[in-house]
Amino acid sequence: MNVLEFSGLLALGSLLAGFLGALTGLGGGVVIVPMLTLLFHVNIRYAIGASLVSVIATSSGAAAAYVREGYSNIRIGMFLETATTVGAVVGAAVALHVSGSAIAIVFGLVLLYSAYLSSRHREEHGPQMKSSPLAEKLKLNGTCPTPEGPQPYSVTGVPAGYGLMFGAGVMSGLLGIGSGAVKVLALDQAMKIPFKVSTTTSNFMIGVTAAASAGLYLNRGYISPGIAMPVMLGVLVGSLIGAKLLVTAKVKALRYLFAAVIVALGIEMIFNGVTGRV
Amino acid sequence: MSDESVVAQKPGTWNDQRIEIIIGTLLRTGVILAAAVVLFGGIVYLVRHGHEAPHYATFTGEPQSLKSPADIMHGVMQFKAQAIIQLGLLLLIATPVARVAFSAVAFAIEHDRMYVVITLIVLVILSYSLFAS
């Protein structure tokens, strides 16, 4: 296989990953690293660098479309980014000092956990009415557009959300993923922010978080143009197509299928990490 | 009237369509520009190196010429394909950074001093990652 064929296959696989990630809402970044390491035998450090770059592309591309809808809360996003960016720098710094096998094992566990999170029945909570004093001080409360006009919501659980966001940042920096699932968990479950606001604000934060570790990765030579080029272009195009189809497609069965793929990849990543093959 | 109460009266200012359109345009332009540069560099790269064998199984790290913004620009000047791809990736990384920088300005226009400070903290962390290592 020469570079041309290698790049073509990478672009095709990344396109599929981006497409399924956008369609199922699980994110394409989470399958890029296993695909590169398990299928294409790319070293995990290069894989993480390429994945991180593709995460920035999809997050910014999607945010450009969402931002007009007026759901994302920019103050919540910015305040919590002080946690995710520090976490991302810490995660990237840790990644520089641990073995590829250890990263693969952690990656596998995170894959299993994301599959679990996505399969769990989510309890819809109504808009929170009582805000915490801290949320008020930080001006985090906002309004969410609904068919009946703007619906105000209040925010609570700020310290817990902040802590979770730091963890999401560490994961993002260590593994080169967006960790959107943990971000939504922090916003939706811990801080009781309406779901639509949580998902768009999470997406808003993913690009900034990934940019915080991407700089470090670039400086350490993890971002290889030959891999990042087909991956970034493939994921971007795939996620744009997926987002366009999202409105019409019935995705429930696909979501389960994709979750099953993630479980299989997670087990294989752990196996390869334990046996030292990654 | 203090700054505090002005902001408190209009929590929806950030829903101001103008700012959102600017942010949306900024992000879209950044991504499209980055993707175009990466694609262009990629074509040049494949034309020049397409027949070579890929070698990514072991991690050696990219050479110094592809790691720092200054060195990448140097390579772009010499029309090196891989440097052009890296430039596109740098533009991509810069897109969310530009968004944060723009937010700092927007908060300043709103006289929201607390959020100007918060936004600048995020900007400092991002700059540290990109330039200080």
Image: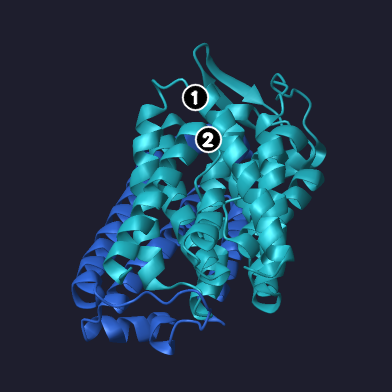
A51 to A257, vertically: above or below: below
Marks 1 and 2 belong to one chain: yes
In this image, A76 relative to B103: left or right?
right
Chain identifier, colour blue: B
| Residue density around tag 1, few if under 14, some if 14–19, many if 20 or more, within 10 Å | some
Residue occupied by mark 2: A25
Residue A207 badge = none
Q: Quadrant of the C terminus of chain A?
A: bottom right
Disc 2 packing (10 Å; few <14; some 14–19; many ≥20): some
Residue A137 picture location, percent across and down:
74, 43
Task: Report the residue marked by disc 1.
Answer: A251
Which chain is home to disc 2? A
Report the front residue among B93 and A68. Answer: B93
Q: Identify the residue at horizontal 44%, vertical 30% (top origin).
A: A69
- Choose top left, top right, bottom left or bottom right for residue A151: top right
Mark 1 → mark 2, Cα distance in angstroms: 9 Å
The quadrant the N terminus of chain A occupies is bottom left
In the image, residue B54 sits, relative to residue A231, either above or below, namely below
| Residue B1 seen in the current view | no
Hue of chain A?
Answer: cyan
- Circles 1 and 2: CB atoms closer than 8 Å: yes
Task: Please state the horizontal and vertical placement of residue A112, each as a whole percent of the image.
Answer: 70, 45
Q: Earlier in the sequence, mark 1 or mark 2?
A: 2
What kind of residue is marked 1? Val
**What x and y, as percent, mark residue A100?**
65, 71
Q: Residue at x 33, y 48 (%)?
A: B28
Query: Is any part of residue A89 visible from this angle?
Result: yes
Q: Is residue A45 above or below residue A171?
A: below
Say which of A151 and A243 sits in front.
A243
Of helix, strand and loop, which one carries label 2?
Answer: loop
Q: Secondary structure at mark 1?
A: loop
**Residue type beneath disc 2:** Gly
